[in-house]
Amino acid sequence: MLTPKITSTREVLNLDGLWRFDLDAAVGEEPWRATLRTTREAPVPASYNDLFPDPRFRDHVGVAWYQRTVRVPHGWRGTRVMLRLDAATHEAAVYVDDDLVVTHVGGYTPFEVDITGHVTAGGEFRLTIGVDNRLTPSSIPPGSVDTDSLGRPRQRYMHDFFNYGGLARSVSIQSVPAERIDDITVTTEIDGTSGLVSYDLVTTDLTPGAEVRLRVLTADGTVVGASSGSRGVVEIPDVRLWRPGAAYLYTVVAEIVRDGEVRDSYPLAVGVRTVEVRGNRVLINGEPFYFTGFGKHEDSPVRGKGHDPAYLVHDFELMRWTGANSFRTSHYPYAEEVLDYADRQGIVVIGEAAAVGLNLAIAAGYLGQTEVTTFGPRGAFGDTTRDAHAAHLRELIARDKNHPSIVMWSIANEPDSRDPGARDYFAPLVSLTRELDPTRPVTYANMILAQHDTDVIADLFDVVSINRYYGWYQDTNDLAAAEAHLEADLRGWEASFHKPIIVSEFGADAIAGLHAAVDQPWSEDYQTALVAMYQRVFDRIDSVVGEHVWAFADFQAMPITQRVDGNKKGVFTRDRRPKAVAHALRARWTSLSQAKNPE
Ligand code: GCB
């Protein structure tokens, strides 16, 4: 599915703004059949939970309704009209006037539907979207809804970030030609001083005489290569590579031409670069790459997970200020605008699926129970969850496969990888990921309960990613013990797997402004000392090829007693002010980028 773009043959009408909005219980039966009975409005894109000072919205479990009137541009006569939602978290039913036109499951990937038969150019229609925020044992991410002692529905889930719901990304309609390009897949290789761009176009059925062609343009518009047919390879002589920190993008323009006239045209930004794992190194363009940066969230005050270009630019500027070269889209696919920007800014991305919380051992482990079964027929997550996970991976890779910034897929965060059933669950998903994208390494983020000698899936993956909290959840307030345990742990993985290791999470909560002369958890000083201790260990272990601090910024969390107005492991506060650790990271990473990733 191609991102909506205005081209010489396509138009887009963005529907962002204030929509009529209310919760299911307020609007009566079949609310799509008439103007929504409410005076309330909500912005799109934004999560709805924090907009209203009312726990009914914040803690809502179930469906919320968005509605607006849309006028189809009169010039769209004779074209196909597509409706596209960049995300509806987590499930959506979409109505055009009285008709259900599409449903979709999965809160972080886009979907579209052809609504040509339901609308008229120049006319208006009523667009109503029911968005359900419930997580179930077979949704990705998983969760469950139970009834509390007062008979109210309560959402349970196994990840700590707040379960924001609503339309957190853009909604648009587009006019596209009947005869059109439906998908483009581009992969790149380097051959001496040339770049090779292989492409594969999917089109609608073409009428006789229609021809497909493709041109590659430099950033200033000079054509450097061309081809015809739905598949092929274009060579770019004296190629300028996409490099971390020094992005360069070509534009591939795909076209359908008939009778000398361009019937469809679609431009795609393409960066020529390679990624591979060799021994215990990750190579980008054949050179070892050391990842510095963060696990992030899409999270900000008021708008929750709503995409916001101001936060996008500011976050990237702050990352650049710390000397970070990369981040992980923990724990779900981010808005496409984020990846487009990463492509242009030369920031490296580990693209993570929304499979977070496939782990019953985390709660059980902390409560002292030992026997839990997460996966398999006797566990909570069997074939139905795996099918949902596979469907999600298909949508993720279909959306993001062409981004040069994405160098790796992380297909799950902290699954119960000690559970024997994890192997049967994950082996097909790893194969599927490789089949969908043979060009990128695959990883998952390991959690401490599965160690190098008890984890049953790590060998299936290309890169070992490890989330560790020595000095915080374990060895609390004891950095000496934490240092010894961390080193032994990492050395165990190095010796067992001989693969590159990225420490994909490490950190400590810190309340901005709290200082202490001696080690004290929750102080900025302790957070800084803990991060420095981890880095000393990383520097002693050859296989460590990356350090992603948890987390970029404080973020809203599920309300539990371990969280003080959210998770405070941010290097920046939720409003993006640096804690002391930010300055320490800046000192290390700006000098590391010279030493480990020379230009
Ligand atoms: C983790 C999770 C992350 C949490 C973090 C924490 O291991 O991957 O989502 O936010 O720990 O702060 O507990």
Image (cartoon, grey):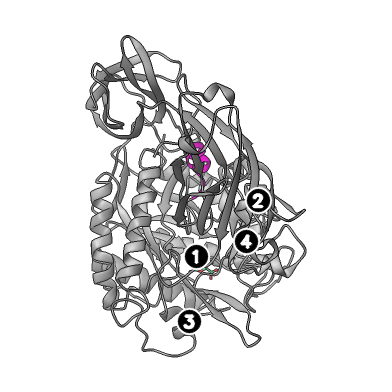
The percent position of residue 220, horizontal first and vertical second, equals 46, 16
Q: Disc 2 or 3, which lies upstream in sequence?
A: 2
Q: Disc 1 or 3, which lies upstream in sequence?
A: 3
Disc 1/disc 2 C-alpha distance (Å)? 51 Å
Q: Disc 1 or 2, which lies upstream in sequence?
A: 2
Q: Label 3: state its secondary structure.
A: helix
- Image point 62% across, 60% down: which residue? 64
* The image quarter in which residue 235 lies: top left
* The image quarter in which residue 564 lies: bottom right
**Residue 340 among magenta residues:** yes
Q: Which residues are magenta?
A: 334-342
Crowding at mark 2 (Cα within 10 Å: few <14, some 14-19, many 20+):
few
Q: Which residue is mark 4?
A: 555
- Picture disc at residue 506: 1
Which amino acid type is marked by label 2? Answer: Ala
For residue 85, side relative to residue 270 (left or right): right
- Asked if the residue at label 3 sits under 8 Å from ligand 1, the reply is no
Q: Label 1: state its secondary structure.
A: loop
Q: Is residue 305 visible?
A: no
Disc 3/disc 4 C-alpha distance (Å)? 21 Å
- Asked if the residue at label 4 sits under 8 Å from ligand 1, the reply is yes
- Picture disc at residue 363: 3
Quadrant holding the C terminus: top left
- Asked if the residue at label 1 sits under 8 Å from ligand 1, the reply is no
**Residue 100 among magenta residues:** no
Q: Disc 3 or 4, which lies upstream in sequence?
A: 3
Which one is nearer the viewer's eye here, 598 or 372?
A: 372
Disc 2/disc 3 C-alpha distance (Å)? 45 Å
